[in-house]
Image: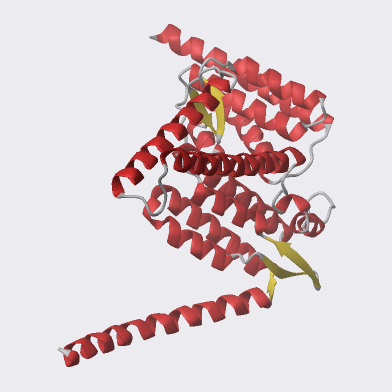
Amino acid sequence: MVHARFAEMSCKIRQTIPKLMMAVLISMLTAGEAGAVATLLNYENRVVRAAEQIERIKVDQDYAEEGISHIKGLLPRSEQIELDQRHVTVDNTWLYALLDSYAAEPDPQQRIAKLNEAAGRLRALDDHLRRANAPPADGGNPREKVREILSRPAYQPEPDTVVGAFVKKVLRRIRALMGEVLMSLRQLLEKILGVGASGGWFSRVVLIALLAAAGFFLVQLLIKMRVPRAKRKKTRVILGEEIAADDTSRELAEAGLEAARAGDFRTAVRKLYVSLLYELAERNLIELEDSATNHEYLRKVSRFNVLASPMHYMTDRFDYVWYGMFPSSEDEFAAYRSRYEEAMHRAKTLAEQSASAV
């Protein structure tokens, strides 16, 4: 028996050692890659491969854990990139934050939204990296833009806001208070019933039942004390944004224009883009999908020739401003709004023509 167990353990060890050696080797290679200064081309290649891994995770949930590990191996949290004989520090923490929040998110729609956000930002970053290696067309220096992107604070995780930190502090205090209340109830019941750790099993059962009843009563009391909230409306998800079922494309556009008046042109661009997609779906020109990306919607709309041009323009600007996180001016937003209104008018005409032909 001893020899059999020893042989079994030896077999397991022989099977495990190669795996451990391989893991150590991969770790050494990854560490070496992260520690060395990478070229711009090498970094761009790894960004593309990371985006490909995200697309694979979207279609194969079982691959998520392995895929996320692979992505983190491709793009370390921090690394050095050589750009015009200068070293630029790149912080990929934003990607880690998105991947970690994806892994912790229970809502399938929000999980897909986080993957879409990560893929979109990687795709936009890759586009600028590839342009940096091309000769400038407008006399500008695309490498300077890339250097600015890679060192931008927007690619770092956002710290807790004052309100968020306050809410977390309040919740911790409520949990501590609940624990103290339950402990006081237990001590009080022990004194009233004369039971404790030395009591019989029947006394303990009675104590547990009373504690459970007191806890249930306390929870019900807290629920009744809460301000009643309206029932959550059914929503539709467009590019990770939840839209109430009774919202309209006009309301979404108004929210975008309100953001533009406040100087938040990035949000304004997103709202108008989502508004157009919502309108196209309402006119039965496309179908909305929780997991669809902006480029997948572009392919759907491109089959309508009259919509292809404004949709292509709006998708490019959406990539540039939202995923690329480039600032947009009032004049640029005015041009974007003009193409939005053009697309909306063409969508209306196209839908009317389709309805009259039926």
Q: Is residue 54 above or below residue 66?
A: above
Residue 125, percent across and down?
A: 66, 53
| In the image, residue 248 above or below residue 121 | above
Give the residue drawn at x 50%, y 59%.
68
User: Which residue sits at x=39%, y=80%?
Assistant: 19
Is 30 in front, or is 172?
172
Q: Position of residue 204 (x, y in %)?
A: 35, 46
Of 224 and 227, which appears nearest the observer? 224
Note whether residue 175 is visible.
Answer: yes
Horizontal relation, residue 130 to residue 28: left or right = right
- Horizontal relation, residue 258 to residue 123: left or right: right
Q: Quadrant of the C terminus?
A: top left
Q: Quadrant of the N terminus?
A: bottom left
Where's residue 224, x and y in %?
A: 53, 20
Residue 140 appears left or right of 287: right
Residue 156: where, in percent of width, then height? Answer: 71, 54
Q: Residue furthest left?
A: 1
Corner quadrant of residue 287: top left
Kindly give the residue lying farthest to the bottom in the view shown: 3
